Amino acid sequence: MVGRLIRDRVFLFIYRKFIFIFIILTLNPVDVNSRSIIVDAEIDNLLKEYAIQLYEVSELSGDEIEIFIINDSSINAFVTPKGKIYINTGLLIESDFPNQVISIIAHEMGHVIHNHHITRRLESESMSKKQIIAQIIGIGAGVSGLISDTDSLKNIGTGITLGGTNVATRDFFNYSRQQEYEADMAAIRIMESAEQSSIGLVEVLNKINAQPHIYADLLNPLDLTHALPEDRINLLKIKISEQKYFKKVDSQELMHRHNLMKAKLIGYLGLRNIYPKGTIYYKYVNAISYYQKGKLDLSENKMKEIVNIEETPYFLELLAQIHRDKSEFKKSLEYIEKSLEILIERDPQIEILYADILIASNDRENILKGINILESNAYVKVMKPKIHWELSQAYYEIDNIPKADLNIAKYYSLIGDANSAKRFSERAKKGLKYSTPDWLAADDIQNIH
């Protein structure tokens, strides 16, 4: 039993290499090639900050929209039928200013305000799936693939119909172009209310138009889910030029954080370092690149250079991870605790890393503390698989095998491995007290699967 539990844990140890956690979407078997979602405290919090100022002036509340980052090099973003916003890494990396990303978030919010994420799905469901590649709402000249929260993202990119001569199909595309106009206008209103320029929307559309895989001049406008960029851009330029805050630019502080976000993505994704040598961004890319390659001493040295210039929770977070990977748990705990101390708001992702370091130290008192931290963060949806895996490991370390089995069963249930979930839940029930909350949880997993 112990040997099997250890084997079942091995593949998730890759999580320990990353602060930047790649979580593959839990999809149907045909969705193996789907894009992955990127979870990172520094980037997530910056995007949240971008969005909050828009929520405050719109009719949406801050909990109505969730923003996720997709590891995709194309410049795009979209909203699903459930109102979740997805932003490609390509958009973030290619953005020159925060305003460009903020404008796109406002555009996606415009779709939600007008209920396009709902009406688009209803409209598409009234048509044969054989007629079209059913649409998802985005910002670019080509976004396709019927995307719900359980559908594949692998077909995103073309935006061309399979049955372009069908009248009903073209009516649907005309409707989608109207939606894009409404979302654009909503974005302009939101940005104006937030006392910001909307010029970033035009700048991003120009970038999309310049992408090598877009050949707008070769496509029939009626066969696209979006108006051709030139038409859209000309209209937007007129509307945006009338804004009171048309010429307003981003603050230096926000530009700095935006560049740190881009540097982090570039470093983790192994892309070319675009920053001038000697800058903090150049050093950040290199530090992360060294970390990714397992060159921990070089990464540590670069991060210490950076911390001597500026100390942020996220720089300290990376230093904590470096020392954790070097099994230097005392130093690791010092850095992560300092990171938590200087955070303005509580951050579940950094707390989860803290718990991971505590558990890895193999000190019983630390392990119990780590368990409490993980249990208190079990509500964080996107982190649930990792949390339950870590809890399983922690309970195993203190010889609480039934609780270890229960948590590994929850992990497998979350990632869609029904057989493993059932096997571990059945085993957990044998060691748990009948009818307790834990036993009932195990019983639910067993019966559901």
Image (cartoon, helix red, strand yellow):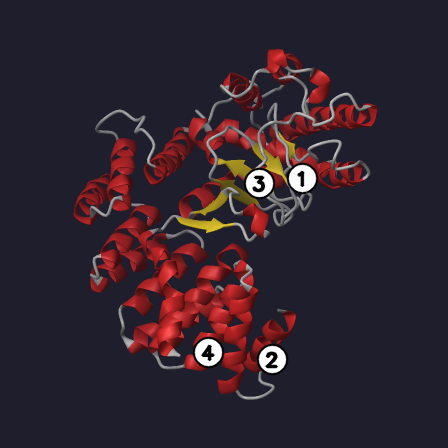
Residue 154 x/y as whole percent = 56, 38
The disc label shown at residue 440, or none: 2
Measuring 57% from the left and 40% from the top, which residue is drawn there?
Answer: 153
Rendered view: 67 above or below 171: below
Q: Which mark is first along the chain, 2 or 4?
A: 4
Viewer-closest of 391 and 343: 391
For disc 1, the neighbor class at 10 Å (few under 14, some 14 to 19, many from 20) is many
In the shown orientation, is residue 121 left or right of residue 406?
right
Where is 343 relative to 138, above or below? below
**Quadrant in which the C terminus appears:** bottom right
- Dot 3 or dot 4: first in sequence order is 3
Q: Give the residue number, with chain letter if any, for mark 3.
A: 153
- Mark nearest the camera among 1 and 4 is 1
Q: Position of residue 363 (x, y in %)?
A: 27, 74
- Front position among marks 3 and 2: 3
Mark carried by residue 146: 1
Q: CA distance from mark 3 to mark 1?
A: 8 Å
| Residue at position x 51%, y 65% in the image | 412
Query: On residue 328, which mark appears?
Result: none
Amino acid beneath label 1: Leu
Q: Which residue is mark 4?
A: 403
